[in-house]
Amino acid sequence: MAFQLDDRLAADTVSVMQSGVIDVRMMRDARYYWLVLVPKIEGAVEWFDLPDVAARGLFTTAQECAQRLQALTRADKMNIAALGIMVKQLHVHVIARHEADEAWPGPVWGVGEAVDFDEAELKDRLIALRAIL
């Protein structure tokens, strides 16, 4: 079976770039700088489902994305999470958080409604992210 991105991840995110076997995606919510890292490995649900090289690659990619996103956004806190409750497919969230954001200090999930980008905003955000990643 070939790798297929979960339908919900496909609907809620847009691809920014590929880093090895990791698809670095951006959440379609303009309120946050929010990346979603998806290992393109069929059947991966848990981090330990990945081969060692891919598991280390996912960790390194999450760490690098968090560092670069923090520098870009001057975030007060970086959240990195692999919950997998709503979407079973393994994916890791990397979210730049600010004390002024509407969800602070709680989690971003379920707080308010996502704000989608217009075409120009989406293009600008992708350019900014690709420049730092």
Image: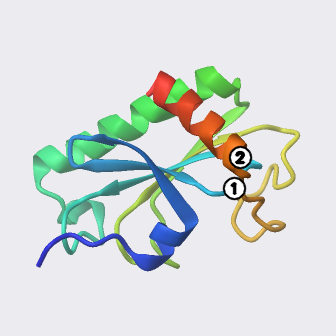
* Residue appearing at x 61%, y 27% in the figure: 70
Residue at the spot of label 1 = 29
Is residue 118 shown above or below 65?
below
User: Are circles 2 and 1 on residues that touch, CB within 8 Å?
Assistant: yes
Does residue 8 appear to the left or right of 53 in the view shown?
Answer: right
Q: For residue 128, what is the image quadrant?
A: top right
Does residue 17 appear to the left or right of 104 in the view shown?
Answer: left
Label 1: few (<14), some or many (≥20) within 10 Å? Answer: some
Q: Position of residue 13 (x, y in %)?
A: 53, 60
Is residue 84 shown above or below 125?
below
Q: Position of residue 3 (x, y in %)?
A: 21, 69
Q: Position of residue 68 (x, y in %)?
A: 51, 25
Q: Amino acid at mark 2?
A: Tyr
Q: Amino acid at mark 1?
A: Asp
* Residue appearing at x 55%, y 38% in the figure: 126
Question: Element under label 2?
Answer: loop
Which circle marks residue 32 in the picture?
2
Question: Element under label 1?
Answer: loop
Which quarter shows the C terminus?
A: top left
Distance between the alpha carbons at the discs numbered 2 and 1: 6 Å
* Residue appearing at x 63%, y 57% in the figure: 28
| Residue lying furthest front | 119
- What is the number of callouts on the image? 2
* Residue appearing at x 14%, y 73% in the figure: 2
Give whichever of 55, 9 is nearer the camera: 9
Is residue 87 shown above or below 128?
below
